């Protein structure tokens, strides 16, 4: 479908029935409740995949709301431990109140980190738009002072990411690399897909040669092939990296190919009551996905 059609479809989102967005969400969101997400996680574990769970939402409006989200993440760690799922957690700092102040967010984040430490689990601190980058990296540094098993995300389309990586790079670093989904200005972010991909590979090389554990998060199969080549060139054991993709995104058998090579593959599984706003926002931020979503509505699940 053409980009023009996709943009027209996105413009019509407010007039579309909630059921349309619901059809999209069922494929890519693991329900509204933690129990549903944990069932999905266990099923994915049974197929050889690792999982990271994310409660949908960001930009809370009050300290009380941020506290409720914090409590939900603390509870999620204990529920993961109780059911034995091979799953960790990813969260967005704005969901814990970053917009309301870094001190509030840090206090909430420390509660989640403490739950991760109590259950022996890992926490991924997601990266949002560039306005949050400095605060997010500072929060990551604060968390590492109290618990080792915490890792940040760096976005390949930002010009600054190589410098950021150099500042935090060590053999203790566990970093997720992704392309980046937020709209950013050309002055601070690469715009051409080829430039973003080249920087992704360069960042992966920088991190891997620096001894970090690297989560390679992309659905771009040609880029995955380039990363496989890099892994081969560096003669890295599978314990040094993993591949990550979003739940529900068709990959044409590529994930099974990676597994057959002994590589770890982790599925990012979002869930929560905010699925409707999340789905609309993601479609608006990425108009080209709209046509993809529409075409997939009529495929067998």
Image (cartoon, rainbow, N blue to C red):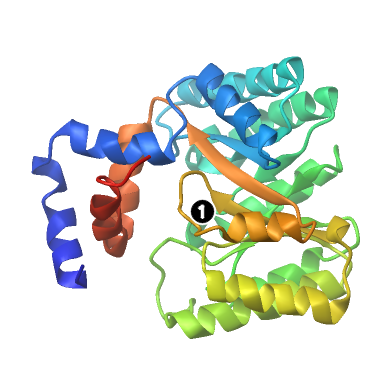
* In the image, residue 43 above or below residue 183: above
Residue 158: percent from the left, percent from the top? Answer: 55, 73
Residue at the spot of label 1: 128
Residue sitting at x 52%, y 84%: 195
| Count of numbered labels shown in the rendering | 1
Q: Secondary structure at mark 1?
A: loop
| Horizontal side of residue 43 vs 27, given as left or right | right
Circle 1 Cα neighbour tier, 10 Å, few/some/many (<14 / 14–19 / ≥20): some
| Horizontal side of residue 24 vs 100, given as left or right | left
Residue sitting at x 69%, y 53%: 152
Residue sitting at x 79%, y 70%: 207
| Horizontal side of residue 116 vs 195, given as left or right | right
| Horizontal side of residue 92 vs 107, given as left or right | left
Q: Nearer the viewer, residue 13 or 232?
A: 232
User: What quarter of the picture does the N terminus occupy?
Assistant: bottom left
User: What quarter of the picture does the C terminus occupy?
Assistant: top left
* In the image, residue 97 above or below residue 299: above
* In the image, residue 162 above or below residue 62: below
Residue 89 falls in which quadrant of the image?
A: top right
For residue 104, say whether it is visible.
Answer: yes
Residue 292: percent from the left, percent from the top? Answer: 30, 58
Residue 180: percent from the left, percent from the top? Answer: 50, 64
For residue 97, say whether it is visible.
Answer: no
Residue 147: percent from the left, percent from the top? Answer: 85, 38
Residue 172 falls in which quadrant of the image?
A: bottom right
């Amino acid at each position: 479908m053409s980009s023009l059609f996709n943009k027209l479809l996105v413009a019509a989102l407010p007039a579309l029935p909630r059921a349309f967005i619901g059809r999209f969400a069922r494929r890519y969101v693991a329900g509204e409740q933690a129990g549903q997400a944990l069932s999905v996680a266990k099923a994915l574990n049974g197929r050889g995949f690792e999982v990271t769970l994310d409660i949908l939402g960001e930009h809370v409006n009050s300290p009380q709301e941020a506290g409720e989200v914090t409590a939900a993440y603390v509870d999620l760690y204990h529920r993961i431990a109780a059911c034995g799922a091979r799953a960790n957690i990813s969260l967005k700092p704005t969901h814990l109140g970053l917009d309301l102040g870094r001190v509030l967010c840090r206090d909430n984040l420390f509660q989640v980190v403490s739950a991760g430490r109590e259950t022996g689990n890992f926490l991924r601190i997601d990266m949002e738009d560039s306005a949050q980058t400095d605060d997010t990296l500072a929060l990551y540094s604060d968390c590492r002072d109290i618990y080792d098993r915490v890792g940040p995300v760096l976005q390949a389309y930002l010009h600054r990411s190589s410098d950021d990586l150099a500042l935090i790079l060590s053999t203790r670093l566990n970093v997720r690399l992704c392309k980046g989904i937020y709209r950013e200005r050309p002055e601070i972010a690469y715009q051409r897909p080829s430039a973003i991909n080249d920087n992704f590979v360069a960042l992966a090389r920088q991190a891997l040669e620096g001894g970090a554990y690297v989560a390679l998060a992309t659905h771009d199969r040609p880029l995955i092939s380039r990363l496989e080549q890099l892994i081969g060139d560096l003669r890295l054991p599978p314990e040094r990296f993993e591949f990550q993709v979003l739940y529900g995104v068709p990959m044409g058998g590529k994930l099974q190919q990676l597994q057959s090579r002994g590589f770890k593959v982790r599925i990012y599984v979002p869930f929560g009551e905010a699925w409707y706003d999340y789905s609309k926002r993601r479609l608006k931020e990425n108009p080209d996905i709209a046509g993809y979503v529409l075409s997939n509505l009529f495929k067998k699940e």
